[in-house]
């Protein structure tokens, strides 16, 4: 595994690979790797000749200073985990000045209604920051395929749109959510939870599963109300939003229309740590 920290060295290396006609898969991450990330990397290694993993904690997508400051990092552990997967993997871990040579600022993207809902509504500017860093990373690496998790489902839709509006020549591949034993979606932020809260947070997935069951017989509004009541009696978990939305447009579902694909989305604070999850309903 080679580690690159500058754009120039990294792109020279990739040009060599492309000259040999090798297919390149990319997995952009913010590090503190866990099995969720590693599943993306393993899939990329199966489907491509070489894999580039990027680790960059992108300042422009954080709308909360403390969240950025406390974001976990463990470079040695990350490198060890990646080395254990495959010899096909290289790591791009740029400094901020490499990604933002003209100053740390998000671009402006026409993301439409996708960015006004849920994560976009509660984290203003977040998706502009995501689009900025993902466009930059994809333009540097020019992979054939790029892998993203459905854990951040709204982000996945935004990135598909980004690729479309910017004409990026890359196949965007969405991968299923990887969970801990109690159903909690794996996340780098889980490391900040106490053992007790990690256990308690199992409710997030359990409530999504129940919502899925109820969705067969109750209206979207009734399901939303049912979930809201569930959290009212759990003081450790603060429900920020629970939404049922069209899986393609993210328009909130008012009447259950079984011919359209619907998804439930949730964001919960556990002792100030923000956790998100989602599930396909039909
Ligand atoms: P992050 O490091 O949180 O920016 O995540 C990097 C990539 O890994 C994103 O595409 C995430 O959606 C994906 N990812 C993070 N957690 C999971 C998970 N539990 N299951 C599947 N993909 C995940």
Image: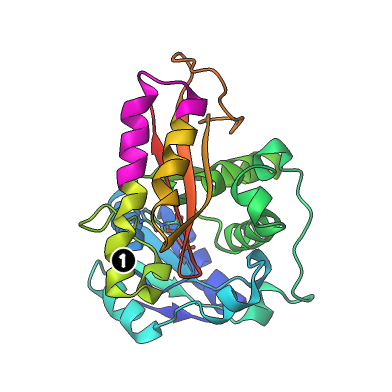
Which quadrant contains ligand 1?
bottom left
- Can the viewer see residue 6? no
Query: Dominant secondary structure of the magenta stretch?
Result: helix
Residue 227 drawn above or below residue 90? above
Q: How many marks?
A: 1
* Residue that extends furthest to the front in the rendered view of this protein: 233
| Residue closer to the observer: 223 or 170 | 223
Residue shown at 53% from the left, 65% from the top: 15
* Residue that extends furthest to the bottom in the rendered view of this protein: 76
Q: Which residue is mark 1?
A: 198
Q: Of helix, strand and loop, which one carries label 1? A: helix
| Residue closer to the observer: 91 or 185 | 185
Is 111 displayed left or right of 6 in the figure?
Answer: right
Place of residue 161 in the rendered image (x, y in percent of width and height, measured from the top left): 63, 40
Q: Which residues are magenta?
A: 206-222
* Magenta residue check for 68: no
Which image quadrant: the N terminus? bottom left
Place of residue 200 in the rendered image (x, y in percent of width and height, measured from the top left): 31, 61
Residue 250 drawn above or below residue 267? above
Residue shown at 32% from the left, 36% from the top: 210
Residue 255 drawn above or below residue 76? above
* Magenta residue check for 215: yes
Residue shown at 76% from the left, 49% from the top: 109
Q: Quadrant of residue 282?
A: top left
Is 31 displayed left or right of 250 in the figure?
Answer: left
Place of residue 151 in the rendered image (x, y in percent of width and height, measured from the top left): 42, 50
């Amino acid at each position: 595994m080679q580690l690159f920290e500058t754009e120039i060295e990294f792109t020279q290396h990739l040009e060599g690979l492309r000259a040999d006609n090798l297919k390149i898969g990319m997995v952009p991450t913010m590090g503190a790797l866990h099995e969720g990330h590693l599943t993306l990397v393993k899939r990329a290694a199966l489907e491509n000749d070489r894999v580039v993993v990027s680790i960059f904690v992108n300042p422009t997508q954080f709308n909360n200073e403390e969240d950025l400051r406390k974001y976990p990092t463990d470079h040695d552990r990350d490198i060890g985990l990646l080395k254990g997967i495959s010899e096909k993997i290289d790591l791009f871990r740029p400094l901020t000045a490499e990604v933002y040579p003209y100053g740390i600022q998000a671009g402006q993207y026409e993301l439409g209604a996708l960015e006004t809902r849920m994560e976009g509504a509660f984290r203003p500017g977040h998706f502009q920051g995501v689009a900025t860093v993902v466009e930059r990373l994809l333009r540097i690496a020019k992979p054939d395929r790029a892998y993203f998790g459905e854990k951040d489902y709204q982000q996945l839709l935004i990135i598909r749109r980004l690729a479309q509006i910017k004409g990026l020549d890359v196949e965007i591949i969405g991968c299923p959510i990887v969970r801990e034993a109690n159903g909690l979606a794996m996340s780098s932020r889980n490391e900040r939870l106490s053992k007790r809260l990690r256990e308690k947070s199992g409710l997030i997935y359990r409530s999504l599963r129940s919502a899925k069951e109820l969705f067969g017989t109750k209206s979207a509004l009734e399901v939303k109300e049912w979930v809201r009541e569930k959290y009212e009696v759990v003081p450790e978990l603060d429900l920020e939003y629970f939404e049922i939305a069209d899986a393609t447009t993210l328009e909130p579902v008012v009447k259950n229309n079984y011919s359209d694909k619907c998804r439930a989305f949730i964001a919960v604070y556990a002792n100030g740590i923000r956790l998100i999850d989602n599930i396909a309903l039909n």
